[in-house]
């Protein structure tokens, strides 16, 4: 069953490509620099992104290097094939295809593995029925913004996978858990408190082996920082563009937690987790059930502590909104962990669960189809951006048309991100209506029905019938 889940989810994630942007491009640029030039400086590619750190005359990524390191292997294979075939890997169309394939290899694969790991954990550790396990997995996979971020080269989905693996292995495979936890830290500095929680969760007997597993990843991170920023303890955050930093803030970005930000990242229309995926309310119900039953108390404490750490850090962060993004992207690593309490509540008020699941899946499918990264300047990205674009191909009059790079006013019902990997903003190098801009983001259905709503019909049917088949198979299987 876990293999079937992987195939269903992987095909759906790989079908969509959310396009380029500062974050995606800088992660891709570091992989390109390593493969093409044997360096971690991205001087040769700096004109296509603003997410940079400048140190001693060189330009570096202002992100942790983990995702780029993961991208090196698939990109090295593509680069070697293209060079041997006489294809120019610097041409715009080849860059678009390469970025899509690297995103599939790194993020779509990570997202599909998350779905399979949740299922296995649900069956083996929670003792959930096959049917309930499949239902919760499908809701997490298609009803949350795990879907959206599996189509763009951001750090959050691989980070979520590594933390989930570290959690599932901490008490039984501590060395592997340590490796996964170290990889999570290599992808995302904010994982540090979660790694400490997982060290506690694994228990005293496993602590040394957990640390031994994590140590090589921590050393790799320190070596990278020493080479790039002059000290093993100096992060890319401290050396980033000064416009991203606040005077007096810790590391230039962290202050005191803001209750208004907590409200916005949980409930608000701008970045609210439960607004984007109301079905996740069942995770809260599941926590109540677990507390009442005194079930998996150590696991619940670990999940709660990890979630609290991500919430508090995000609420303290000056860039908590995530720029061009959907949902509270810095909270994404905790979403797979919410599957555990959800398993305890999925049978409660089943009609309500199905209703909330249907809303969540529909909204998140529309996000992926239109643009997984709406501008931070749009206060209600679902109601005033995603839905109007998909339904009419136009935006409400209340959305200003300028400046283009701020509002992402790129029209059409699907795949509206027009930023190519060789430009920092839409239409800087490629004019409106150009082939490069039109294919800067896409879904595979557009090969037949370009820029048409019909392009998502095949994958919508794949998700629907595949989910029904898996659920029916699970319902009739031996528990």
Image (tube, rainbow, N blue to C red):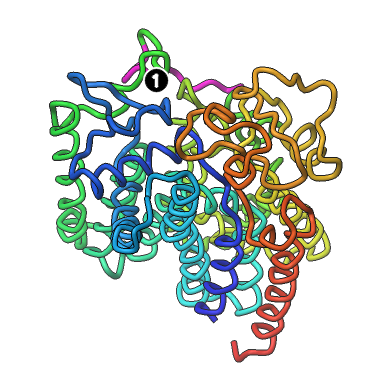
Evaluate whether residue 137 shows in this view.
Answer: yes
Q: Is residue 185 visible?
A: no
Residue at horizontal 14%, vertical 34%?
227
The quarter holding residue 381 reads top right
Q: Which residue sits furthest front? A: 86
The image quarter in which residue 269 lies: top right
Residue occupying image coordinates x 67% and y 54%: 282
Q: In this view, does 465 lie above or below 407?
A: below
| Vertical order, 135 against 33 (above or below) | below
- Residue 141: image quadrant is bottom right
Position in image of residue 271 (x %, y %): 63, 33
Q: From what the image shows, is residue 176 above or below residue 333? A: below
Tell me the chief SS of the magenta region. Answer: loop
Image side of residue 468 versus residue 215, left or right: right
Quadrant (top left/top right/bottom left/bottom right) for the N terminus: bottom right
Left of 138 or right of it: where is 151? left
Q: Is residue 259 magenta?
A: yes
Residue 47 lies left or right of residue 304; in this view the side is left
- Is 369 on the left-hand or right-hand side of 262? right
Find the magenta span and give its range.
249-260
Rendered-image quadrant of the C terminus? bottom right
The residue that mark 1 highlights is 253
Instruction: Out of 177 and 385, give the one closest to the viewer.
Output: 385
Q: Is residue 82 magenta?
A: no
Where in the figure is residue 383, as x and y percent of width and height?
79, 35
């Amino acid at each position: 069953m876990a293999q079937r889940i992987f195939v269903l989810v992987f095909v759906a994630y790989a079908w969509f490509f959310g396009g380029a942007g500062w974050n995606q491009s800088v992660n891709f640029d570091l992989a390109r620099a390593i493969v093409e030039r044997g360096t971690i400086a991205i001087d040769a590619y700096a004109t296509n992104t603003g997410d940079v750190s400048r140190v001693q005359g060189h330009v570096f990524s202002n992100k942790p290097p983990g995702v780029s390191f993961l991208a090196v292997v698939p990109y090295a294979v593509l680069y070697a094939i293209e060079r041997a075939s006489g294809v120019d890997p610097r041409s715009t169309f080849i860059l678009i295809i390469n970025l899509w394939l690297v995103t599939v290899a790194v993020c779509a694969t990570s997202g599909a593995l998350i779905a399979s790991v949740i299922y296995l954990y649900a069956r083996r550790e929670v003792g959930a029925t096959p049917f309930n396990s499949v239902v919760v997995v499908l809701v997490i996979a298609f009803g949350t913004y795990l879907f959206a971020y599996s189509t763009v080269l951001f750090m959050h989905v691989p980070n979520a996978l590594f933390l989930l693996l570290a959690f599932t292995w901490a008490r039984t495979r501590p060395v592997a858990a340590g490796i996964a936890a170290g990889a999570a830290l290599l992808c995302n500095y904010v994982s540090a408190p979660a790694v400490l929680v997982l060290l506690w969760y694994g228990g005293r007997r496993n602590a040394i082996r957990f640390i031994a597993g994590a140590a090589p990843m921590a050393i790799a991170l320190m070596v990278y920082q020493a080479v790039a920023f002059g000290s093993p303890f100096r992060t890319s955050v401290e050396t980033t563009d000064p416009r991203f930093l606040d005077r007096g803030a810790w590391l230039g970005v962290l202050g005191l937690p803001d209750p208004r930000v907590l409200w916005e990242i949980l409930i608000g229309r701008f970045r609210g987790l439960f607004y984007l995926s109301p079905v996740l309310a069942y995770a809260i119900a599941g926590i109540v059930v677990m507390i009442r039953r005194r079930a998996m108390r150590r696991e619940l404490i670990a999940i709660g502590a990890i979630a609290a750490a991500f919430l508090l850090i995000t609420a303290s962060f000056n860039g908590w909104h995530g720029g061009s993004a959907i949902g509270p992207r810095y909270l994404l690593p905790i979403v797979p962990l919410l599957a555990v309490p959800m398993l305890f509540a999925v049978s409660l008020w089943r009609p309500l669960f199905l209703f909330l699941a249907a809303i969540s899946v529909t909204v998140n499918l529309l996000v992926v189809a239109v643009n997984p990264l709406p501008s931070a300047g749009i206060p209600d990205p679902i109601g005033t951006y995603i839905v109007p674009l998909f339904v009419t191909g136009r935006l409400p009059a209340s959305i200003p048309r300028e400046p283009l790079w701020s509002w992402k006013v790129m029209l059409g019902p699907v795949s509206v991100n027009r930023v190519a990997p060789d430009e920092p903003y839409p239409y800087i190098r490629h004019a409106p209506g150009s082939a490069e801009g039109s294919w800067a983001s896409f879904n595979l259905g557009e090969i037949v029905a370009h820029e048409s709503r019909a392009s998502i019909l095949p994958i919508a049917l794949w998700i629907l019938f595949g989910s029904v088949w898996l659920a029916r198979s699970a319902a009739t299987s031996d528990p």
